[in-house]
Amino acid sequence: MGTGQLAERLQEAGPAAKVTIEVQDDGRVKLNVDKLGALGEPKSLTWLRKRVEKMLPKIDLPDLLFEVNAWTGFLDAFVHLGDGTTRMKDLPTSVVALLVSEACNIGLAPVVNPATRP
């Protein structure tokens, strides 16, 4: 579509057009686009979303991380910086707590001490 065709179609649309062309004082052309409104969701999407939600198990994020670790062993990749081994008894639990605190952007205090949760 050429510039002339675009101008014609905008003129035909009149005030209902979401796009306008403005010639500025210095001769430059400015294209203005109004904010477009959101389209409604089709009923089929709403139905599908509800159906999928009902199929998903209700699980806490830490439990999910421990389950994924059981499948993959990803928590074993976290080691002590000094020598690659650690004497820390519950390192996987501590790593999960750190991951949850970072993922939720809440810091460690609410994870370590449930009384300080927001």
Image (cartoon, rainbow, N blue to C red):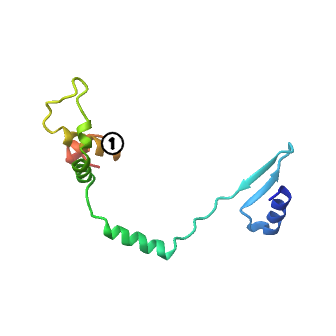
Is residue 31 shown left or right of residue 112? right
Question: How many residues crowd around disc 1 within 10 Å: few (fewer than 14), some, or many (20 or more)?
Answer: few
Residue at screen point 70% across, 56% down: 33
Residue at screen point 27% across, 40% down: 98
Question: Percent x, y for residue 73?
Answer: 24, 44
Front in this rendered view, residue 107 or 39 = 39
Is residue 90 shown left or right of residue 42? left
Secondary structure under the numbered disc 1 in the rendered image:
helix
Question: Percent x, y for residue 27?
Answer: 87, 45
Can you say whether 95 is above or below 117 in the image?
above
> Which amino acid, mark 1?
Glu
Can you say whether 110 is above or below 11 in the image?
above
Q: Which of the 4 image quarters holds residue 97? A: top left
Residue at screen point 86% across, 42% down: 26
Residue at screen point 52% across, 74% down: 42
Front in this rendered view, residue 106 or 99 = 99
| Residue extending furthest toward the front | 72
Question: Percent x, y for residue 8?
Answer: 84, 64
Q: Which of the 4 image quarters holds residue 25? A: top right
Can you say whether 34 is above or below 71 in the image?
below
Residue beneath label 1, please? 102
Question: Percent x, y for residue 104?
Answer: 34, 47
Q: Which of the 4 image quarters holds residue 7? A: bottom right
